[in-house]
């Protein structure tokens, strides 16, 4: 006998060795699964993507002036411009970046207030840059926040990368639904505080406007009429004094449309020295309008000042009032911070609310709150990348189960045996051992965490066909040796394994070499590693574990007598 044939024959000849193979394989399978709860292997929808650009979102408190926002902008720019890999910066004051991939779902187009701005950061080409963009943002984020956040109290600075796949509002999004806006705001703030104390979460923000005091300037129509003025005059000077306005147009042969001429007061003239009613009234007193009789009328005489509360933005989803609380993950899987934060929320809200957990759906992490005193109901719904992850894994899981069922049915039709079909599927499924262990090993060759991603699952599904082919080769060849050459079961399985080992190994080498280029890709690296490590595991399973199952299966027998020999077999000696 050849070396491998002798080795397999020795295993099949010993009951204890066969049991040892089964036990070791089962142990390897369950130990590989334990790498998830022990965090040796981390799962995530998509890994970080190295790109040639990223953005910095600056949000000062609602009601802040453009000067205050610019103060923070300049601080951020001063830090970023010293980076060698940053080619140039573009600042968009009081507005969002013209729609890019990340901004499609982050509401960039709706930004049009003085307290917001976005900075577009353009980097050198990713193929010539040693530091990927997602590691650069991870390094710069604490430096920028430490220096720039204290400049204006309540400022929020977020580093936003171009997503590697389906864009989401954020990695972690919690929607707080409820009709009582005051309590919804209170719950949202408490959730944000829990996020801030959760390890692995950064760029935390509550997407709601702060309610602040403001002053309305209302022309008194009766006083305006008695003063010999018009309401239009009063409105125009108010806009001119605080905002500016178009007063004329210019024509140019180089421009097809008229060019507006915008008149605005100097910064010192329109800026108030304080944020109170007296300062505003003093400013209005300094503005005079000439009436029809040529007399100057102070604006404060015809304008009423009224202090009111601001009107916050109203957000709805599925006809339900809601507020979003968002956070990004700092190079960790979003699953573990989410579960940690969720447990803290259950503990924190249990004092005031009755909590009901959601069932087993893609909304399985949702929490239903009922106020113990008033009976008001609120919903904490998880969205963002976590929801996309659950949806994707559900869809890929469904595709995987469908593939298993179809393969099994085809095998049953071909072999007319449930046992043989089950052996082939079980051998294919155990390639998962290699997929998981391969991601753990890949962590030692990368500077960042190598996540098991959706592309890894695609690789595992692709392995099903490859692994099934290995088992089919062994079973068909062993059956032909038994049926046409009269070999006994044990010898036929050993011979088939040794004979088919070479084509199985060559197929594996071809897959490994073909997938080597994928392994270094930031997005499809999981697919490459899954194919490489899963193929290696599939070879060992096919050549050691599957022969044991074949020998134990009665479906492989062909009219055997009491000695395990075919009644019409020819004695073959070696």
Image: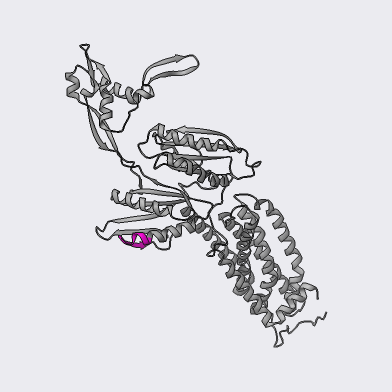
Judging depth in this view, the residue of 318 and 80 nearest the camera is 80
Q: Nearer the viewer, residue 312 or 267?
A: 267
Q: Is residue 89 left or right of residue 157?
A: right
Is 333 located above or below residue 102 in the figure? below
Where is residue 218 drawn, in percent x and y?
A: 23, 28
Name of the residue lying farthest toward the top: 294
Residue 191 % position (x, y): 38, 53
Q: Residue at x 29, y 24 (%)?
A: 238
Q: Quadrant of the N terminus?
A: bottom right
Residue 232, image x, y percentages: 26, 21
- Camera-side residue of 250 and 335: 335
- Seen at 37% across and 55% down, the residue is 380
Q: How many marks?
A: 0
| Range shown magenta | 346-356
Q: How is the image coloured?
A: one colour
Q: Is residue 529 magenta?
A: no
Q: What residue appears at the point 51 percent right and 47 percent down from the top-left corner?
A: 166
Given the current orientation, which residue lies at the most extreme right position?
574
Q: Is residue 244 above or below residue 357?
A: above
Q: Is residue 156 above or below residue 456?
A: above
Q: Residue furthest bottom?
A: 562
Q: Does residue 362 appear anywhere in the picture?
A: no
The image quadrant of residue 271 is top left
Q: Position of residue 206 (x, y in %)?
A: 39, 47
What is the quadrant of residue 20 in the picture?
bottom right
- Left or right: residue 339 versus residue 570 is left
Residue 146 visible, this orientation: yes
């Amino acid at each position: 006998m050849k070396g491998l044939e002798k080795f397999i024959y020795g295993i099949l000849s010993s009951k204890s060795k066969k049991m040892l193979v089964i036990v070791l394989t089962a142990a390897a399978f369950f130990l590989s699964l334990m790498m998830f709860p022990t965090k040796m292997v981390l799962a995530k929808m998509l890994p970080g993507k190295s790109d040639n650009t990223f953005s910095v979102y600056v949000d000062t408190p609602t009601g802040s002036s453009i000067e205050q926002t610019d103060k923070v902008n300049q601080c951020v720019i001063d830090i970023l411009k010293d980076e060698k890999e940053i080619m140039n910066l573009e600042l968009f004051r009081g507005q969002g970046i013209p729609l890019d991939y990340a901004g499609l779902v982050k509401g960039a187009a709706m930004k049009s207030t003085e307290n917001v701005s976005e900075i577009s950061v353009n980097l050198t080409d990713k193929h010539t840059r040693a530091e990927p963009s997602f590691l650069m943002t991870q390094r710069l984020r604490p430096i920028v926040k430490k220096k720039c956040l204290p400049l204006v109290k309540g400022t929020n600075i977020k580093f936003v990368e171009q997503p590697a796949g389906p864009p989401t509002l954020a990695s972690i999004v919690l929607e707080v639904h409820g009709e009582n806006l005051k309590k919804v705001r209170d719950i949202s703030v408490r959730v944000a505080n829990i996020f801030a104390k959760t390890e692995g979460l950064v760029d935390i923000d509550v997407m709601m406007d702060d309610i602040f005091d403001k002053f309305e300037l209302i022309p008194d129509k009766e006083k305006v009429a008695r003063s010999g003025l018009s309401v239009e005059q009063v409105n125009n000077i108010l806009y001119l004094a605080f905002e500016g306005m178009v007063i004329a147009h210019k024509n140019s042969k180089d421009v097809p449309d008229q060019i507006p001429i915008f008149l605005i007061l100097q910064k010192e003239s329109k800026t108030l020295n304080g944020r109170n009613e007296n300062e505003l009234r003093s400013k209005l007193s300094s503005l005079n309008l000439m009436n029809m009789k040529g007399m100057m009328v102070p604006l404060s005489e015809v304008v009423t000042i009224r202090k009111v509360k601001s009107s916050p933005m109203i957000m709805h989803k599925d006809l339900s009032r809601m507020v979003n609380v968002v956070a990004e993950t700092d190079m960790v899987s979003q699953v573990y911070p989410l579960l940690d934060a969720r447990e803290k929320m259950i503990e924190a809200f249990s004092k005031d609310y009755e909590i009901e957990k959601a069932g087993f759906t893609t909304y399985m992490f949702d929490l239903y709150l009922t106020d113990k005193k008033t009976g008001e109901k609120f919903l904490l719904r998880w969205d963002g990348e976590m929801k996309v992850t659950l949806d994707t894994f559900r869809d890929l899981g469904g595709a995987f189960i469908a593939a298993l069922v179809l393969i099994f049915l085809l095998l049953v039709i071909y072999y007319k045996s449930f046992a043989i079909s089950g052996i082939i599927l079980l051998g294919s499924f155990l390639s998962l051992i290699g997929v998981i262990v391969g991601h753990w090993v890949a962590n030692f060759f990368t500077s960042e965490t190598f996540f098991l991603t959706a592309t890894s699952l695609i690789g595992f599904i692709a392995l099903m066909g490859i692994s099934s082919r290995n088992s089919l080769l062994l079973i068909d060849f062993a059956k032909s040796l038994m049926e046409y050459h009269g070999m006994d079961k044990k010898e036929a399985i050993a011979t088939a394994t040794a004979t088919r080992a070479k084509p199985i190994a060559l197929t594996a080498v071809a897959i490994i070499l073909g997938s080597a280029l994928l392994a270094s890709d930031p997005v499809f690296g999981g697919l490459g590693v899954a194919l490489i490590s899963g193929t290696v595991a599939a070879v060992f399973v096919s050549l050691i574990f599957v022969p044991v199952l074949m020998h134990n299966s009665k479906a492989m027998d062909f009219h055997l007598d009491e000695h395990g020999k075919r009644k019409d077999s020819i004695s073959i000696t070696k």
